[in-house]
Amino acid sequence: MVRTTEGVWKRLRPLGSLWHVSGTLLLVSALVGALLVATGCSKSTTPNGNGVSSEATATQSGHMAGPALEVHVPQSAVDDSPAPWNLNTPESAVRSYLDWITYAFRIGQSGVATATMSAAEEVRVDSYNQYNLEKSRLVDQTLKAITFGKVSTGATSTLLPAKESWTYSYLSVAEGNKVIGGPYSADYDTTYTLVKNKKGEWVVDSVAAKARGTVK
């Protein structure tokens, strides 16, 4: 479960294999795994329109097995949610995606970011979140810089290249969230594939990332 000053969330160990990952968020794009989702109890954080409410109740999903993992998250981290997502353009959608998965990994709840991505990308992001929780850690990351390249529009999707610089640390899931790794830095050449959802908004469908240097 994920414990805050106002409520608890429950995460269960997933069925199926975990993806091979090393480092920060962008590596989830190259990985393959099972659908991994959260079960919830009282007062967890889930998307509500374009924002987050710490009073919301998570929904229960299947494909779960194994013992619950207790994860402590300071209320201050839960309250520090990003600005409402902006899915009007490919660039704004990518920025919103990065903001919201950064928040999701910090609080250990991938579901808060689902509005910014397709169902396929949701599986990848949630699997990476589960991977870190099974290692008893949260990811605290910061986007230091991003520069977008030229958009390439296809028949069914749009490609948006970018160059990114990040800093990140791994935090213990125990109360106090002690730093157990980092801070590290990482630079990436990335290509985002975006599609439009049923509302006609841009969402991230996948991410291809190549690290420039070592990622820990």
Image: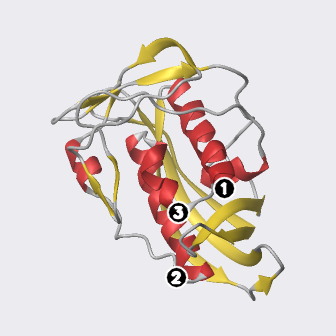
Q: Which residue is mark 2?
A: 88
| Amino acid type, mark 3 | Thr
* Near-viewer residue (83 or 216): 83
Q: Which residue is mark 1?
A: 26
Q: Secondary structure at mark 3?
A: helix
Mark 1 Cα within 10 Å, few/some/many (few <14, many 20+)? many
Residue 110 is situated, as x and y percent measured from the top left of the image, at 48, 44
Against 199, residue 36 (above or below) is above
Q: Earlier in the sequence, mark 2 or mark 3?
A: 2
Asked whether, in this view, residue 214 is left or right of residue 1, the answer is right
Task: For the residues labelled 2 and 1, say whether their Cβ atoms are less than 8 Å apart.
Answer: no
Q: Which residue is mark 3?
A: 116
Q: Going by the picture, which residue comes out furthest to the left?
A: 6
Residue 80 is situated, as x and y percent measured from the top left of the image, at 28, 57
CA distance for labels 3 and 1: 15 Å
Task: For the residues labelled 2 and 3, say whether their Cβ atoms are less than 8 Å apart.
Answer: no
Asked whether, in this view, residue 148 is left or right of residue 57, the answer is right
Residue beneath the point at 49% across and 28% down: 61
Mark 2 Cα within 10 Å, few/some/many (few <14, many 20+)? few
Residue 135 shows in the view: no
Q: Looking at the rendering, which quadrant does residue 65 occupy?
A: top right
CA distance for labels 2 and 3: 11 Å
Residue beneath the point at 66% across and 52% down: 121
Residue 106 is situated, as x and y percent measured from the top left of the image, at 41, 46
| Amino acid type, mark 1 | Leu
Residue beneath the point at 69% across and 41% down: 22
Against 150, residue 198 (above or below) is above
